Every structure is written in C-alpha cells, then in structure tokens.
C-alpha cells in the first residue's frame, strides 16, 4: 500500500535556526514527489516537484532533496513568515490522486 | 496570472439544504480535482475529471456530486449536507491524471453546516 509519513508533526524554531523536515514514502514506482506549503484557512501552495533520487530543488530559504526512500525539506535561516504547515505528497498510479503525509506544522518565532 | 479560483470562500448552509461550490481555472489544464480537508487532516480526494470523463473515488458518499460543463469550470454539489460534511473543500488542477505533473490548488471554500 502506498504510504507517506512526515516527521516531526510540529517543529518550533527560533528565527535563523536552520532545520529539516522529513518525508518518507513507500510507493510502487515513484512518479514524482511534491512539496506544498499550506497557511491556515488557505489551499496548499505548490513548492517543488522531485522526480528521481539525487535531485535537489531550491527556492529562497527552502531546499528539497530526494532519496529512494525519503525526501527532506531543508529550511535555512528561517523567518517568521516561513511559519506554515508543509505537506509532501506522491501521486497514486491511477488517476493521479495525491497521497499526502499528515504534514509538519512549522512555527518560527522572532 | 494563471490561477485556480474558488467561490465562495465561505459558505454556510443548513443541515439537509443543498449547496453548490464553484471552481474555475485559467491554466487550461485537462484535469480538475475536488478534495475535502477537515481540521488538522490531509486533503482527501473526492473525485476528479479528466476532460469530461468523471472519476469517482470508491469511498466518496453518494451525497457528493460534481459537474464540469466546460474546461474552465467545475462544480461540487452536496445534495443533503450533514454536520460531518463541514470542512474545507479544495479544487485542484493538473495537466494530466498520470501523476507526472504537480497539482495547483485554489484557495478553498470553508463550508459550515448549521
């Protein structure tokens, strides 16, 4: 059964304190892995797509990496505006349905 | 900017009173999805359209229906809302339904059932 697990569930950082979020997955035939950011009361905002092990993508303070079993979202010198829930997802082979992890709720304090 | 638009952003309906949520897109994507997201949970797919081809998830209650009159618009109809249907409803689009392209989400409609 395809499964996505994110850790930690919640992460509190001080502004400038770098850290990483983990997304481990079990899927048959990875077609891609997606990272989203979701602010309270809003729809998920697309961040990155990773397709193959060893791939990396960067955007401002965020960097996503992919191995054969997991993906990491590295946050370098975070700011309070980076506070949000970060979701990772993989597409199910049929219909493209996204299988989401439960998310990591990130809080960055000034 | 190309985008996914949902209306209304907030909807209040009474128990059992039919309600329709709207989604439109300017991305010209072939696929439109409807997800339900309850508090502190991940989004859960209800159904999707690939062009005019409707695909229902096995566990989606019959109470939920959808229409896609053209490429740009898609509607979610809840025929008899129950208290358990209170949630955020998210519309998303993608170029295809093979999972090789990312999905773009709208801002969501928060449904309250009284």
Image (cartoon, coloured by chain):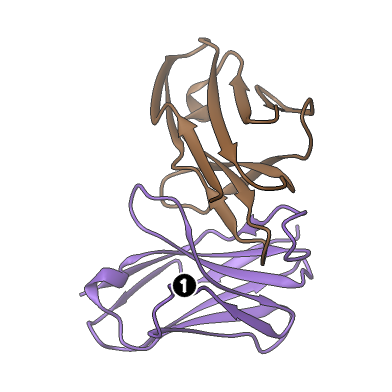
Where is residue A5 drawn, in percent x and y?
48, 37
Q: Provide residue B70's location: percent of width, then percent of height.
A: 72, 86
The reply, left or right, for residue B31 in relation to residue B11 is: right
- Residue ID at (67%, 48%): A28
- Residue receiving disc 1: B8
Q: Is residue A45 above or below residue A7?
A: below
Percent coordinates x, y for residue B32 in the rendering: 65, 71
User: Which one is in front, B63 or B3?
Assistant: B63
Q: Chain of mark 1?
A: B
Which quadrant, please, contains the C terminus of chain A?
Answer: top left
Percent across and percent down for residue B52 are 71, 85
Location of residue B105 (image quadrant): bottom right
Q: Residues within 10 Å of mark 1 (few under 14, many from 20)?
A: some
| Residue under the point 78% across and 40% down | A51
Could you tell me which secondary element the residue under label 1 belongs to?
Answer: loop
Above or below residue B102? Residue A88 is above
What residue do we see at 66% from left, 56% from top?
B104
Q: Residue drawn at (68%, 42%), measured in percent from left and top?
A: A33
Res A75 visible: yes
Q: Give the color of chain B as drawn.
A: purple
**Is A26 above or below relative to B4?**
above
Residue A86 visible in the shown view: no
Tally of numbered tags:
1
- Label the brown chain with its letter: A
């Amino acid at each position: 059964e395809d499964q996505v697990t994110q850790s930690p569930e919640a992460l509190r950082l001080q502004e400038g304190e770098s850290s990483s979020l983990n997304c481990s997955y079990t899927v048959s035939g990875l077609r891609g892995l997606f990272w989203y950011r979701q602010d309270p009361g809003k729809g998920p905002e697309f961040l990155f797509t990773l397709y193959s092990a060893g791939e990396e993508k960067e955007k401002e303070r965020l960097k996503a990496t992919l191995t054969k079993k997991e993906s990491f979202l590295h946050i370098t010198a975070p700011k309070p505006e980076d506070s949000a829930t970060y979701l990772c997802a993989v597409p199910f082979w049929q219909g493209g349905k996204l299988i989401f992890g439960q998310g990591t709720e990130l809080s960055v304090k000034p | 900017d190309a985008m996914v638009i949902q209306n209304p952003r907030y909807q209040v309906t009474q128990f059992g009173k039919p309600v329709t949520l709207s989604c439109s897109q300017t991305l010209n994507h072939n696929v439109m999805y409807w997800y339900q997201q309850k508090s502190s949970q991940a989004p859960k797919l209800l159904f999707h359209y690939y062009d005019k081809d409707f695909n229902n998830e096995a566990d989606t209650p019959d109470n939920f229906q959808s229409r896609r009159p053209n490429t740009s618009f898609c509607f979610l109809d809840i025929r008899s809302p129950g208290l358990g249907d209170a949630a955020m409803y998210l519309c998303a689009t993608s170029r295809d339904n093979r999972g090789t392209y990312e999905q773009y989400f709208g801002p969501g409609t928060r449904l309250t059932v009284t």
